[in-house]
Image (tube, rainbow, N blue to C red):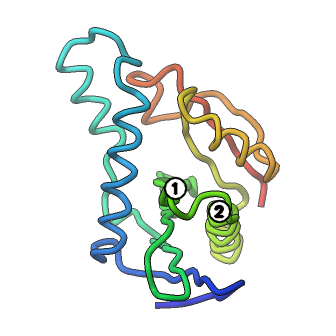
Amino acid sequence: MSERTSTGSRIIEVPWDDARAASLRDELDADLGARYEGFHGDEPEERAAARSRALAMHPDEIIATLIAVDAAGTPTGHVILRRLGEEWEIKRLVVTAAARGQGIARRLMTEAIDRAREGGADRVILQTGIPQPESIALYESLGFTRIPVYEPYTETMPRSICFSLTV
């Protein structure tokens, strides 16, 4: 487990199955469920299942699971860096509601980008959507530029907003 500290909070690397990381992913799932309710319209169950498969995280693809913790050790944020074929992809960024507005998402993103660069990546990519305007603003402020929707999202989430950043 590695660790970087700044202004009373720390970003630490944890295993994928760390209970704190899993809890933060559950919080993200609840938030995204509310944001995307009805977004895909009335679609066949098969298409919804295909989207779930496209969004699935496979632990063997994960390069780093990073969480932010405050001075008391309370988890406040989460991000994953994974290999998606030949690409380096950032996934599952979340900051708890109580910790928003403190720059935690930016710090998590910067750490993930640094890890990709240190690992030999030429660029990192990510996928988000219209119901996540805060995320879109963050990515653009970090210098990400929009790219076409990429696999595995093309078929089941063609309205995704995808980005890349040369590192």
Residue at (56% x, 35% y) in the render: 132
CB-based contact (under 8 Å), mark 2 and mark 1? yes
Residue 118's x, y, as percent? 69, 77
Residue 1's x, y, as percent? 46, 90
Q: How many numbered badges does the structure rendering display?
A: 2
Q: Would you name the residue on which mark 2 appears?
A: 109
Residue at (35% x, 17% y) in the render: 38
Residue 132 relative to residue 136: left or right: left
Q: Looking at the picture, does residue 114 appear above or below residue 147?
A: below
Q: Looking at the picture, does residue 102 appear above or below residue 34?
A: below
Element under disc 2: helix
Residue at (68% x, 69% y) in the render: 107
Q: Residue furthest front?
A: 98
Element under disc 1: strand
**Residue type pointed to by label 2:** Met
In the image, 15 versus 60, the foreground residue is: 15
Residue 86's x, y, as percent? 54, 54
Q: Would you name the residue on which mark 1 appears?
A: 93
